[in-house]
Image (tube, grey):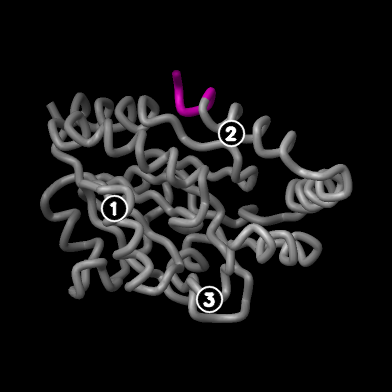
Amino acid sequence: MSLSDETRQLTENFISSQSTDDQVTIQQAFEDIMNADFGSKALREGDNATDFRLPNAKGGETQLSDLLKQGPVVINFYRGGWCPYCNLEFKALCDAMPKIQELGATLIGVSPELPDNSMTTVEKLNLNFEVLSDVGNKIARDYGIVMDVPENMRPLYLKWGLDVPTVNGDDSWELPIPATYVIDSDGKINFAYINKNYTERCEPDDVLAALNKLTAAAL
């Protein structure tokens, strides 16, 4: 089953499990997100990637430019370890890690969660790549991919046990638009997937295809 099939099934099962009133709220919030201009100024293919230095889940710090010295970098901006769609995406990326590494690339995840919560995500999902904490969504803002959880959805998030302000350490209810970037060793964005429909995610095969193109161009 592809990642798209898995996320589609997850959406169908989740929506069907909600009350009629909550389904109406979810639908309205989703329409508000799709009608908003979130991501309209996002960095895309051909743009230069903004460098950053962020805390990692191991208690240290990681800088993008340092990783680029070793080869291409795949950056996955995700909402948080509480998001079931992000968890499905992370599992798919973990499965793709051997091929990503064979192509000489490094994969990192970036979320607004506090470092301790990022560590929990790494341990819970047994991730085989580094996860960085972008507290306050500063880097996501630099990349133009910040969005707000609609106000009418916030009580539902809390009812579902998804306390975004607590895990992120602020009261903003801001999250990154799920986005995946492939950045070449020169710091240029070679591939960009940005989708404010957070129920859809980039297929790992598309990431691998982008990395294969970089490898072929270098020959």
x, y percentage for residue 14?
66, 38
The magenta stretch spans which residues?
Answer: 1-5
Residue carrying label 3: 166
Nearest to N terminus: mark 3 or mark 2: 2
Return the residue nearer the eye: 74 or 30. Answer: 30
Residue at image position (58%, 62%) is 162
**Separation of residues labelled 3 and 1 (CA atoms):** 23 Å
Give above or below for 82 relative to 44.
below
**Separation of residues labelled 3 and 2 (CA atoms):** 25 Å
Give above or below for 50 relative to 94.
below
Q: Which mark is residue 108?
A: 1
Q: Secondary structure at mark 1?
A: strand
Q: Nearer the viewer, mark 3 or mark 1?
A: 3
Give above or below for 178 relative to 149.
above
Q: Secondary structure at mark 2?
A: helix
Q: Residues within 10 Å of mark 3 (few under 14, many from 20)?
A: few
Magenta span includes 3: yes
x, y percentage for residue 85?
52, 43
Nearest to N terminus: mark 1 or mark 2: 2
Give above or below for 157 relative to 217.
below
Residue carrying label 2: 10
Magenta span includes 26: no
Residue at image position (36%, 25%) is 205
Q: Amino acid at mark 3?
A: Thr
Return the residue nearer the eye: 174 or 84. Answer: 84
Q: Amino acid at mark 2?
A: Leu
Q: Secondary structure at mark 3?
A: helix
